[in-house]
């Protein structure tokens, strides 16, 4: 069955999942990276701020660290700490 994740503004361009299945990260047309916590019966979505200036095209986890990386059409990449959803 489909998993309702809530409202996303625009299309999703990139999606990754944690190796333990605890969360998804989605990014796309709305320029935001969103973490979707999958623990429990109701998924919880949180935005990582600040947003990119243009749409997000790539997401990746950083090996051996609790970090993710986002890449955007604004020609920037950002590193994010998942513990506090803050950019580095």
Image (tube, rainbow, N blue to C red):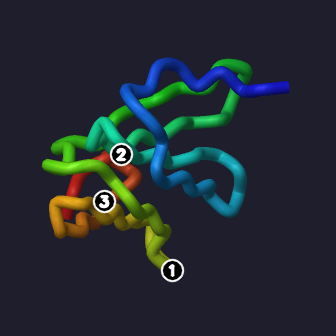
Residue extending furthest toward the bottom: 63
- The residue labelled by disc 3 is 80
- For disc 2, the neighbor class at 10 Å (few under 14, some 14 to 19, many from 20) is many
Task: Locate residue 51 relative to residue 59 in the image: left or right.
Answer: left
- The residue labelled by disc 2 is 33
Eyeballing the image, is 48 above or below 69? above
Q: Position of residue 22 (x, y in %)?
A: 65, 46
Q: Are marks 2 and 3 in contact (CB under 8 Å)?
A: yes
Rendered image quadrant of residue 38 = top right
Say whether disc 1 or disc 3 marks the residue closer to the N-terminus.
1
Tally of numbered tags: 3
Point 49% across, 54% down: residue: 14
The one nearer the camera, 32 or 48, is 32
Closer to the eye: label 1 or 2:
2
Eyeballing the image, is 88 above or below 32? below
- For disc 3, the neighbor class at 10 Å (few under 14, some 14 to 19, many from 20) is many
Point 65% across, 21% down: residue: 4
The one nearer the camera, 58 or 23, is 58
Say whether disc 1 or disc 2 marks the residue closer to the N-terminus.
2
Task: Locate residue 60 relative to residue 30 in the image: left or right.
Answer: right
Say whether disc 2 or disc 3 marks the residue closer to the N-terminus.
2
Mark 2 vs mark 3, CA separation in Å: 10 Å
Mark 1 vs mark 2, CA separation in Å: 19 Å
Q: Which mark is residue 45?
A: none
Point 36% across, 66% down: residue: 69
Eyeballing the image, is 50 above or below 44? below
Q: Which mark is residue 63?
A: 1
* Quadrant in which the C terminus is drawn: bottom left
Q: Position of residue 71 (x, y in %)?
A: 31, 65
* Quadrant in which the N terminus is drawn: top right
């Amino acid at each position: 069955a489909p998993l309702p994740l809530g409202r996303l503004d625009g299309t999703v361009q990139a999606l990754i999942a944690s190796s333990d299945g605890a969360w998804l990260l989605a990014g796309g047309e709305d320029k935001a990276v969103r973490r979707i916590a999958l623990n429990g019966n109701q998924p919880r979505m949180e935005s990582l701020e600040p947003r990119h200036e243009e749409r997000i095209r790539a997401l990746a986890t950083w090996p051996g660290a609790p970090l993710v990386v986002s890449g955007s059409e604004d020609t920037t990449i950002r590193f994010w700490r998942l513990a506090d959803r803050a950019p580095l």
